[in-house]
Amino acid sequence: MALFPLVSNFQEDFVLQLLAVDSENTMNEVAAAAAHHSVGRCVAARPGHIMRVRRQGSENPFPREMKLHDTGLKPMECIEVVWEAL
């Protein structure tokens, strides 16, 4: 377990956020940590959708249960958190 800094680009937010998460967090937990800074502040919640995490510029999100340390992301790399319809 180690503190791991990422930069979060949340869909529809106009501000990039510094995100301190744990290397053992799943992508669901990373998305929830990013949502804490954006949803209900700059971004409206979207019922009927889930949040997905992907590397900036990638089309494909990481699996939701994948651990951060297994993604290959580097400290301070930018992730995108996007909405996906259920």
Image (tube, grey):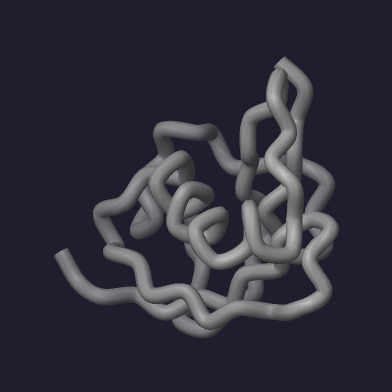
Residue shown at 15%/64% (left/top)? 1
Q: Work out whether 65 lies above or below 30.
A: above
Q: Work out whether 34 lies above or below 50.
A: below
Q: Is residue 72 left or right of residue 10?
A: left
Residue shown at 39%/46% (left/top)? 29
Quadrant that contains the C terminus: top right
Give residue 63's position: percent from left, percent from top.
Answer: 54, 34
Residue shown at 64%/30% (left/top)? 50
Number of disc labels? 0
Quadrant assignment, res 56: bottom right
Q: Is residue 47 left or right of residue 74?
A: right
Give residue 3's position: percent from left, percent from top.
Answer: 26, 75
Quadrant assignment, res 33: bottom left
Give residue 54's position: percent from left, percent from top.
Answer: 67, 52
Q: Is residue 11 left or right of residue 21?
A: right
In this view, the residue in front, 35 or 28, is 35
Give residue 48's position: percent from left, percent from top.
Answer: 71, 19
